Image (cartoon, rainbow, N blue to C red):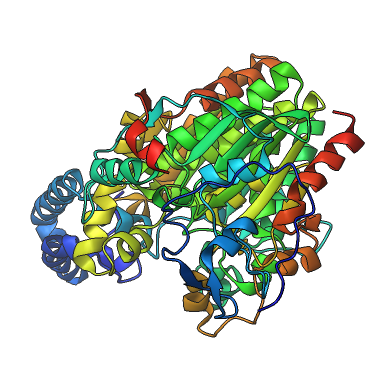
Amino acid sequence: MVRASEHVGGYSLPFEQPVIELERQIAALERRPDAEEFADDLKNLQASRDSLLQKIYRNLTAWDIVRVARHPQRPQTSDYIEMMCRDFCELHGDRHFGDDPAIIAGLGRIGPYKVLIVGHQKGRTTQEKIACHFGCAHPEGYRKALKKMKLAEKFGLPVVTLIDTPGAYPGIKAEERGQAEAIAVNLREMSRLQTPIVCVVIGEGGSGGALGIGVGDRVAMLEYAWYSVISPEGCAAILWKEANPDSNSAAANALALTAKANLANGLVDHVISEPVGGAHRDPQAAAKSVQSWIVDRIRQLKRSKPETLVQRRYDKLRKIGAVAWQEPQSSASAAR
Amino acid sequence: MAQVPSRSWTDTPELAPKGKKAVPEGVWIRCPGCTAILFRKQVENNLWVCPECQHHFRVSGERRLQQLADPESFEPFNEQMAPVDPLRFVDLKPYTKRILDAQKRTGQNDGVQTGTAFIKGRKIILACMDFDFLGGSMGSVVGEKITQAILVAAERDLPVVIVSSSGGARMMESVFSLMQMAKTAAALARFDEQGGLFISVLTDPTTGGVTASFAMLGDVILAEPRALIGFAGPRVIEQTIRESLPEGFQRAEFLLDCGFIDRVVPRSELRSEISRIIDYAGK
């Protein structure tokens, strides 16, 4: 069932404005003591609301999608774990420095499979958000993720990663503790981890911070998630010299960061459809879709030997890139 | 003016003459490190290191090759590999225009040169990034050339030396660029399993997606003095934490203190340092 805006934290996206008025009417009608008499009207209103939402969401721009991906009520890793996973057993700490709450890791059961789940966590309350640095992990977060993935490898458990980060944390401590090294090591080790890895970008796929838990056999994006080498604002600030609504929107377009674009470019394997009006309006339905994709892909991957998986994972990465062949500008070369 | 320190090795090839964009033009140049006015030729003969304060000027990939490899020993491969514009990326300027301008300026197809070379008689696979080419950014070509360099090294059982100088992944190829991080790291995983030696040389600046992939995965990691090395750029960090950064933050010496690189090596000693590591590794 599609939740109304007022049920999703009162936060409404600007492009949803036309829906808001309808929702107000629906709510007012529902509140009436004689609401039952208006059951048909209510149904009609709901139907027009749904079709309007559908229409709006069909035509979202790339920048609109970035805003949906950042919706404060959009389900996060902890929500998906709660909705998809039975008997979740969280595992903390990187065994070197600390425990980064911006990355959650743990064992759990999804469908018929025992798996290891790793995901970015943004936090919901202000306190949580601050503790999680709004989903921006520190090196110890990436090292925790790897530590637990190695555990999964040892016991033959598939790894499920849920990606949702604006980017790895840019700060003094993060640099001191080797943010770059932590991500680099994860890329190398995930490329050769001898167990199935499936990844889902559930919200924001911000650059190296996303890829740091994003190397897998199968990578999917939720319909209104984004995945890019840099955030649209970061890109706008550098290439358009200023981040403002226009340049952010232009950058979002240029970066081809939507699920659809990344699928078309062969950079992800699948797009998981979201409920009408985005995952935040019906988290249960979103979780169901994510879960069925994960279960299905694990089933496929489990048929292959770990060595075969690693070989195919490598072959897949090996092919990514678009290059041409031409003679270098020899005249300039001579002048140097 | 202090006397020019003599070089620690004598088999240097002739340094690249003529106009270079990475370093200032003119007969006299001002050192950005100590503001001393220096005679250009003297700096050039000192491997583009300030004889007064040892400031290491940024040098192009071309010049770097000439400084590092034995004379005439560099044999490039994949010189013809060139960028395309998979996303038809346009910001204030089209990406294709930026590529063309950079190609004209540098005479190179993209931001890295790879090939076989000798260092003090030892055969290696050498890759030198060029900061002049769109900030040394890694798009598909840089990622692919680095990957192939690693694979060739694996095939021929040669050490690979990659000299990094890069602002990170190239924005204009978005996720294509991002995935080059995973691709190069995956190639290094294989190389590592075969017992290959990878010496990563970090020069000013090495940041972003290059640091967070192959550059930090060296068996041995060397860095030039004062080189800026990090994941996030200093300005991004300042904006995030809203305070100015401590002196020396993200410099080579800082990374040494934090335990993330093996040695800080002055430019004049790179050849001998690389050679002896190759010898210790028995490669």
Residue at image point 43% right, 28% down: A269
Residue located farthest toward the bottom when viewing the structure as drawn: B243
Which of the 4 image quadrants contains residue B250? bottom right
Judge by depth and name the residue closer to the eye, A215 or B280: B280
Q: Is residue A38 above or below residue A183?
A: below
Residue at image point 78% right, 30% down: B121
Q: Is residue A171 above or below residue B162?
A: below
Judge by depth and name the residue closer to the eye, A283 or A29: A283
Q: Is residue A16 above or below residue B179?
A: below
Q: Quadrant of the N terminus of chain B?
A: bottom right
Q: Is residue A305 above or below residue A235?
A: above
**Residue A15 seen in this snapshot:** yes
Q: Quadrant of the C terminus of chain B?
A: top right
- What percent of the width, then of the height, locates residue B37? 53, 77
- What percent of the width, then of the height, locates residue A144? 73, 53
Which of the 4 image quadrants contains residue A135? bottom right
Number of numbered callouts drawn: 0
Quick check: A254 left or right of B54?
left
Residue at image point 88% right, 35% down: B279
**Residue A194 seen in this snapshot:** no
Judge by depth and name the residue closer to the eye, A28 or B283: B283
Quick check: A223 left or right of A143?
left
Quick check: A243 left or right of A180?
left
- What percent of the width, then of the height, locates residue A215? 58, 37
- What percent of the width, then of the height, locates residue A213? 60, 45
